[in-house]
Structure formats: structure tokens, C-alpha cells
């Protein structure tokens, strides 16, 4: 590959939008500088009438295109899932595991830790454990038989198996020993998220004070807000310097509730996620989420037994577009919530989630209506709509 310059109407940088001009992509697949005039005789990639944004970052995704992290299938994670996510605009992701036994989660860590560099599509930047230290009342589509109090020894075993790739782990803050667990885990550099929880506001505050900094899919799987007990939702609203995951498919959370969250937290502390399961990008029908049968229809994935939402089939590119169409975010804010903010929330904004000289040229091309036109990885086109 030779150095080339992208011509486009807008370039979405972390804290500004550059209008017009050219963005350099170097011969080694990195972003260079933005300039209003390309050098004479430069190779030009003409995307006039389009916008250039960083590749999307999904920090909470269980599966896609028929693959699921809980299958613990190397090819399913590093090829099937990784490749197919490019069509959703995602260029970096955290394969996400569900509540399970220590041994099963350790095996998943070993598989990803050994093979994450082999990802042939979207880059595997770490692992997220959504569980197992949750409360049964808000188990969601997870197996309560494995839910238990947190163990730092278990975490150390998983992290060793993952070769340091376990970047985020979620807990319910009312569990016994959780504050000590959070403080020890965050001291290692891994982020702790709070969710699937019946915690009071005070319990949630103590979790945040111990070091937890992320809220698992805000509103879903947690005690709501009332005028006498603020609960987990109230804690999300009130506790500053924390990041709220948000599923913007129009099914998990009402658009107005999404709007309220963004007004309370600020768009710079809301991370758009998908919580997508294996049926993402697949036809409606019967699927499995972990150990549970799921029916996918009418834009949702629901447990066959009880009808609870069971992850989503959301594509992150559509979540980005939804919040703009709902009138609750500008295109600039929407891009930020799907790129920089999720990356910052798990500490990987030093390598992805932004257009910056020296960063890998992972980017997407958007139509003026924010539909995805193309995805680039290391400066090379890997998907075209």
C-alpha cells in the first residue's frame, strides 16, 4: 500500500469535525495529518459527499453471524464473528462472555488469549465478562446457578489464562465482599462494571467509590428509580465520572429514556453498545444464547421461556443512526458515543476510537444520512455496502 489522501465532506475527530480537506493515510496503514490541500500528484481516495469517522468500538457484544463467545470456538470468534462485524462498522470489539462456571470462563480466556492476534476482521482489543457475580433477581438471560460472590482468586486465574486480556468484568454491588474485589481488580488495570443488580443507591455509590466506573446496559437488568429509593438507575444519573452502556435499538430502552440518560450523564459519558447475540445479521428464527433457547422476531431476541429480552440483534451502525433520527444526539455526538467513549471506558483509547496521527487507520465511510458505505482496516477497504 502506498500513502494516499482521503477527500471527504467531513472528518469526525474526537472533539471537532473538520469540514472538507484531505486526510492522509500512510503506507504502513496509519492515520497521518489532515490538510486542506493534498500534495501534488498524491493518490486521492475520493469520498466527496461522504463523512469519515473512526471505526466503531463495541465493548459489549456476545456474538454475531451465528457465532457466540460461549461456544468457545476459536474460528467462530477470531474469524466468523470478527469478519462479519466489519459490515456493522465495528473495527474493534470486546468478545463478551456470560455467567458460567469458573472452568468454562477460564477456557474462553485461554482461547481468546492464545488467538486474539489472529482476528481476520475487527480487532479483538480485550475480553468482557458479563458475570458471574450478579444477583438472581435481575439475572436476565443468564444462569443463576452460577451466580455467586466475587472472588479475586478466580479473577486472577482468568486473567492469567487470558494473558492480561480481561479488560472489563461486571458485578452486582450488593454482593458480599464486592468492595474489596473491586478495589483489587481495578488496581490491576481492569475496569469493573456494575449491573444485573438489585442494589440500593447507597450500595451502588459504595461500588463506585471502590473503583467501579461503568454501568452495564443502563436501565436493563437493574433496580429502577423511585422518589424514595434512587436505586441503580438513580446512581447512574447521579454519580459523575462514570460511563453508562446503552442499547439504542428502540426495544431495550425507550428513546425518551435514552434522552434523559444522555442529559444526565452527558454524551461524553454514554457508550453505545449492542449486547448482540449470535443471531445478529442472521434471519429470524430459533437460536441459543448460552444455555437458553431464544426466539428472534420483530427486531428482538427473547427467551422462549418467559419472553424476557435476551441480548439484542442490533448492529452498532444502526444504534449510531437511531440516536440521531430520534433527535437526541447530533451526528458528532453519536459518532463519539460509538467510538471514543466506549474506547475510553475500557482504557483502549490509546489505540482505537479516534482519528489521530499514528493510530491504525481503522475508519468507516458514512453517507450523509449516516448509512454505512464502507469499512477500512489499517487503511485497506474490508467491507463495502
Image (cartoon, rainbow, N blue to C red):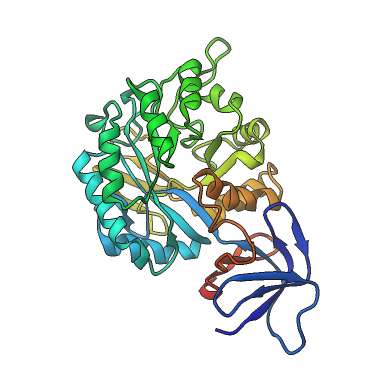
Give the total number of marks visible in the rendering.
0
User: Where is residue 249 drawn, in percent x and y?
Assistant: 52, 45
Residue 304 in view (yes/no): no
User: Where is residue 329 drawn, in percent x and y?
Assistant: 69, 45
- Left or right of 264? Residue 107 is left
Residue 157, located in which quarter of the rendered image? top left
Residue 301, located in which quarter of the rendered image? top left
Name the residue furthest top.
Answer: 228
Residue 105 in view (yes/no): yes
Name the residue furthest bottom.
Answer: 41
Q: Is the C terminus in the top left, top right, bottom left or bottom right quadrant?
A: bottom right
Residue 372, located in which quarter of the rendered image? bottom right
Q: Is the N terminus in the top left, top right, bottom left or bottom right quadrant?
A: bottom right
User: Where is residue 286 drawn, in percent x and y?
Assistant: 30, 50
Relative vertical location of residue 152 with respect to residue 37 in this rendering, above or below: above
Residue shown at the point (63%, 33%) measured from the top left: 265
Residue closest to the eye, 305 or 70: 70
User: Where is residue 165 drawn, in percent x and y?
Assistant: 37, 51
- Left or right of 102? Residue 227 is right
- Left or right of 144? Residue 63 is right
Relative vertical location of residue 65 with respect to residue 227 in this rendering, above or below: below
Residue closest to the eye, 213 or 256: 213
Residue closest to the eye, 157 or 203: 157
Name the residue furthest left.
Answer: 103
Residue shown at the point (46%, 36%) measured from the top left: 216
Residue shown at the point (52%, 13%) measured from the top left: 229
Amino acid at each position: 500500500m502506498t500513502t494516499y489522501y482521503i477527500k471527504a465532506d467531513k472528518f469526525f475527530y474526537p472533539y471537532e469535525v473538520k469540514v472538507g480537506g484531505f486526510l492522509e493515510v500512510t503506507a504502513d496503514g496509519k492515520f497521518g495529518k489532515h490538510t486542506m490541500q493534498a500534495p501534488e500528484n498524491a493518490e486521492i481516495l475520493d469520498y466527496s459527499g461522504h463523512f469519515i469517522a473512526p471505526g466503531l468500538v463495541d465493548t459489549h457484544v456476545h456474538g454475531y453471524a451465528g457465532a457466540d463467545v460461549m461456544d468457545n470456538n476459536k474460528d467462530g470468534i477470531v474469524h466468523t464473528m470478527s469478519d462479519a462485524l466489519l459490515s456493522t462498522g465495528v473495527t474493534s470489539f470486546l468478545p463478551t462472555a456470560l455467567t458460567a462456571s469458573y472452568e468454562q470462563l477460564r477456557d474462553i480466556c485461554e482461547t481468546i488469549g492464545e488467538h486474539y492476534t489472529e482476528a481476520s476482521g475487527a480487532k479483538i482489543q480485550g475480553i468482557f465478562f458479563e458475570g458471574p457475580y450478579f444477583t438472581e433477581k435481575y439475572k436476565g438471560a443468564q444462569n443463576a446457578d452460577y451466580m455467586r460472590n466475587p472472588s479475586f482468586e478466580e479473577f486472577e486465574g482468568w486473567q492469567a489464562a487470558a494473558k492480561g486480556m480481561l479488560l472489563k468484568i461486571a458485578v452486582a454491588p450488593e454482593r458480599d465482599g464486592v468492595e474489596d474485589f473491586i478495589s483489587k481488580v481495578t488496581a490491576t488495570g481492569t475496569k469493573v462494571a456494575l449491573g444485573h443488580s438489585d442494589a440500593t443507591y447507597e450500595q451502588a455509590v459504595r461500588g463506585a467509590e471502590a473503583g467501579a466506573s461503568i454501568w452495564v446496559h443502563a436501565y436493563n437488568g437493574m433496580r429502577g428509580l423511585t422518589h424514595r429509593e434512587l436505586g441503580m438507575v438513580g446512581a447512574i444519573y447521579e454519580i459523575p465520572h462514570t460511563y453508562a452502556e446503552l442499547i439504542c435499538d428502540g426495544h431495550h430502552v425507550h428513546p425518551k429514556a435514552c434522552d434523559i440518560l444522555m442529559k444526565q450523564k452527558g454524551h461524553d459519558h454514554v457508550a453505545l453498545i449492542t449486547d448482540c447475540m449470535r443471531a445478529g445479521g442472521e434471519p429470524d428464527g430459533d437460536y441459543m444464547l448460552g444455555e437458553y433457547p431464544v426466539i428472534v422476531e420483530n427486531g428482538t431476541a427473547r427467551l422462549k421461556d418467559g419472553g424476557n429480552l435476551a441480548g439484542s440483534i442490533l448492529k452498532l451502525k444502526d444504534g449510531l443512526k437511531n440516536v440521531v433520527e430520534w433527535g437526541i444526539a447530533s451526528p458528532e455526538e453519536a459518532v463519539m458515543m460509538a467510538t471514543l467513549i466506549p474506547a475510553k471506558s475500557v482504557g483502549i483509547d490509546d489505540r482505537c476510537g479516534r482519528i489521530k496521527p499514528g493510530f491504525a487507520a481503522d475508519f468507516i465511510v458514512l453517507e450523509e444520512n449516516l448509512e454505512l458505505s464502507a469499512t477500512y482496516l489499517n487503511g485497506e477497504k474490508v467491507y463495502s455496502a
